[in-house]
């Protein structure tokens, strides 16, 4: 199946051929067509849908159990979150960076390690 963005799309206002660009919003990148003349934009419908999926996950609160495994505590990260991150970032690594952000808050960063490896 060919992607709809592989077709020539003309701007509805000036009839100029629209160009493929990458539009990034909150770390989320959208395949986009843009008219270089009047700046009209068309966001790829699939990416729009994915972004909606992201917003849904983002606003969801998960209650997960803290368990002791050996000398560490573990929490289970819901599969739907990890799967979503994997789909977006094509992660190959199982390593994530964990930091003690503030009292009562831990952060997990999924793509920093990969970025560092890309720079090597
Ligand atoms: Zn135009």
Image: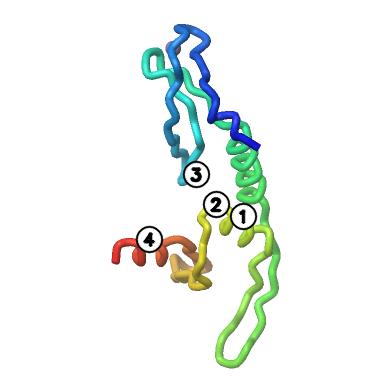
Q: Please name whichever residue, 50 or 21, is drawn nearer the observer in this view of the structure.
A: 21
Is disc 1 surrounded by few (<14), some (14 to 19) or many (20+) residues within 10 Å? some
Residue position marked by numbered label 2 in the rendering? 88
Relative to 15, is 81 on the left or the right? right
Give the label on residue 28, or none.
Answer: 3
Mark 4: is the Cβ under 8 angstroms from ligand 1? Answer: no
Whether tag 2 and tag 3 are in contact, CB under 8 A, the answer is: yes
Q: How far across and down, in percent of the image, does residue 22 sit?
A: 43, 36
Give the label on residue 115, or none.
Answer: 4
Which comes sooner in the sequence, label 3 or label 4?
Answer: 3
Reply above or below: 89 against 4: below
Whether tag 1 and tag 2 are in contact, CB under 8 A, the answer is: yes
Q: How far across and down, in percent of the image, does residue 117 sit?
A: 36, 66
Is disc 4 surrounded by few (<14), some (14 to 19) or many (20+) residues within 10 Å? few
Residue at 46% in and 18% down: 40
Q: Please name whichever residue, 109 or 44, is drawn nearer the observer in this view of the structure.
A: 44
Calculate the distance from the C-alpha at mark 3 to the C-alpha at mark 4: 16 Å
Is disc 2 surrounded by few (<14), some (14 to 19) or many (20+) residues within 10 Å? few
Q: How far across and down, in percent of the image, does residue 79 sit?
A: 68, 64
Calculate the distance from the C-alpha at mark 2 to the C-alpha at mark 3: 8 Å
For the residue labelled by badge 2, is the local secondary structure a helix, a strand or a loop?
A: helix
Mark 3: is the Cβ under 8 angstroms from ligand 1? Answer: no
Residue position marked by numbered label 1 in the rendering? 84
Is disc 3 surrounded by few (<14), some (14 to 19) or many (20+) residues within 10 Å? some
Residue at 62% in and 44% down: 55
Which comes sooner in the sequence, label 2 or label 3?
Answer: 3
Reply above or below: 32 against 71: above
Residue sitting at the far left = 120
């Amino acid at each position: 199946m060919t992607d709809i963005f592989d077709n020539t799309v003309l701007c509805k206002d000036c009839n100029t051929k629209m160009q493929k660009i990458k539009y990034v919003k909150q770390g989320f990148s959208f395949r986009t067509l843009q008219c270089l003349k009047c700046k009209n934009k068309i966001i790829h419908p699939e990416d729009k849908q994915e972004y909606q999926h992201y917003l849904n996950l983002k606003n969801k609160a998960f209650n997960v159990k803290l368990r002791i495994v050996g000398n560490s505590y573990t929490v289970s990260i819901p599969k739907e979150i990890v799967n979503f991150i994997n789909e977006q970032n094509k992660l190959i690594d199982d390593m994530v960076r964990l930091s003690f952000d503030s009292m009562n808050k831990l952060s997990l960063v999924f793509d920093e390690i990969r970025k560092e490896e890309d720079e090597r």
